[in-house]
Amino acid sequence: MGCVSRDTIKRLLVLYLIGRFHDGVYGNFRFQKVLYYALKDASKRPFTYRSTDLGQFSDDARNTLEELAAAGHVNVTELAVVDHSGNRWVLVNKAAVEEYRRVLEGYSKDLLHSVDASIEKYGYLRGEQLRRIAHDDPALLKTPLFDIIFEENVPNLVELDLSPDECEDFELGMNPQFIAAMRGLIEGVESGGISIGQWMQIE
């Protein structure tokens, strides 16, 4: 058995959700709402959602998505179509979806089922239809503006049926700071600013 951090679970969940779409998630609104409905009735919720001017919204989910894009796990392109305002988010390594599923299944089969069901039910609705459903959501309507609709409930460390080495690989592979540091080292070696000997010392 091994452990991964709460942040790794969050990143894996977002990557899995994006990867389950045929050609990526069109629009920030769609990403937020599909994730909201995936978590709404799940027993384990990696993200907190609030009532905002934009409806159900998670700052943490948005930050996680942006971190994954900065780390190179997700490609982002700006959308010009009015109905799909925002960005299109596409998984860089589509083949990794099954690996993400395997890890998340060890955490919560219920959560995986909720994500799949939310994508099937809400993921491909027209923008106006999704907006109408989201704005009529009973949980949103009864929550005062800027109050919490539901809170995350994932512990700091999550035990999984994986080896400690596998868990460490996921921790490092999902960590934006580690990836940025490795990129800096690679660029330093390629530019001649860091020697191979210095690389080994740093490592």
Image (tube, rainbow, N blue to C red):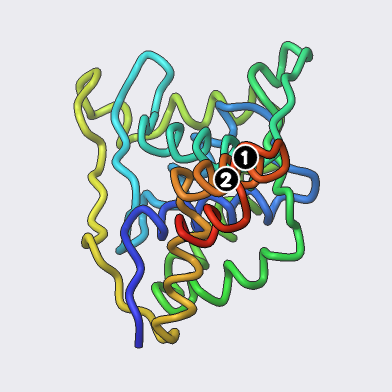
Residue contact at pointers 2 and 1, CB within 8 angstroms: yes
Q: Residues within 10 Å of mark 2 (few under 14, many from 20)?
A: many
Q: Is residue 84 left or right of residue 135?
A: right
* Cα–Cα gap, marks 2 and 1: 5 Å
Amino acid type indicated by mark 1:
Gly
Q: Position of residue 35 (x, y in %)?
A: 49, 44
Residue shown at the point (42%, 38%) measured from the top left: 61
Q: Residues within 10 Å of mark 1 (few under 14, many from 20)?
A: some
Q: Is residue 182 left or right of residue 9?
A: right
Say what secondary structure mark 1 lies in. Answer: helix
Q: Which residue is mark 2?
A: 185
Between 94 and 166, the residue placed more toward the observer is 166
Total labels: the figure holds 2
Amino acid type indicated by mark 2:
Leu
Residue shown at the point (49%, 76%) measured from the top left: 105
Compared to residue 103, the image places residue 72 above or below, namely above
**Dividing the picture into quarters, in which one does residue 140 lie?**
top left
Marking on residue 188: 1
